[in-house]
Image: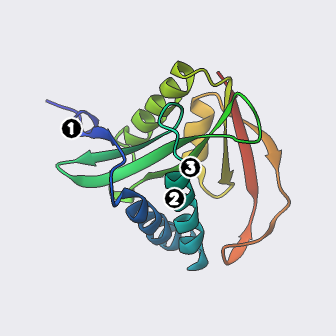
Amino acid sequence: MERPSELVKLRNHRPGDMTYIAHRHAVVYSADYGFETLFESHMSRYTAHFLDNFDPASERCWIAEREGQFLGCIMLVKDREVPGRARSRCFLVEKTTRGLGIGTTLAETCLAFAKEVGYERVGLQTYRELSGARRLYAKFGFQIVKTAEEREEWGRKRVSEIWELLL
């Protein structure tokens, strides 16, 4: 019998995906973590910036899907401020498919590509309340390198964290 994660296909982004990624982040983060509606405009600007500056030699966006249905995504983008460093961004797994290995598959694919194209490290930003994502980051060897003081962000008090992995 096939595991559910074996039925999942990963593909690169195509037209319409960035808008959908911003939409799903807004919906999921609002429902699960109480993020306010301005988060959607932030995600829309971020995904537009990705498209406007996309470098296919060193950046990617992967979409996980099953039979054409969006299940999750992750991006790897060049850190234009720190040479040799990439950032993992827009990591999301739909709530209905969490625990099936989709997040692990997305993260493995992202980190393998980062190594393949010669990045020395990968950083990411998350929030303390995203416990499932934090467990996955720790599993892959990411470590917290900076923790911000609690502050009002996206409609609630939150603690932002910067994590990093040396490749």
Between residue 56 and residue 6, name the one nearer to us. Answer: 56
Few, some or many residues within 10 Å of mark 3 (<14, 14–19, 20+): few
Spatial CA span between label 1 and label 2: 27 Å
In the picture as drawn, the residue positioned furthest to the left comes out as 1
Percent of width and height locating residue 159: 76, 60
| Residue 5 against residue 46 in the figure, above or below | above
Q: Earlier in the sequence, mark 1 or mark 2?
A: 1
Tell which of 107 and 95 is nearer to you. 107
Separation (CA) of disc 3 from disc 2: 10 Å
Q: Residues within 10 Å of mark 1 (few under 14, many from 20)?
A: few
Rendered location of residue 60, percent (x, y): 47, 39
Q: Residue at x 48, y 72 (%)?
A: 31
Residue at 86 percent of width and 60 percent of height: 149
Label 3 – label 1 distance at C-alpha:
32 Å
Report the side of 144 relative to 12 (left or right): right
| Residue on which disc 2 sits | 47
**What residue is disc 3 on?**
53
Amino acid carrying mark 1 in the image: Leu
Camera-near label (3 vs 2) is: 3
The image quadrant of residue 143 is: top right
Quarter of the image where one finds residue 154:
bottom right
Eyeballing the image, is 116 above or below 81?
Answer: above
Taking depth in this image into account, of 80 and 72 the one nearest to the observer is 80
Disc on the earlier residue, 3 or 1: 1
Tag 1 residue? 7
Tell me which amino acid carries mark 2. Thr
Residue 69 lies, in percent from the top left, at 23, 55
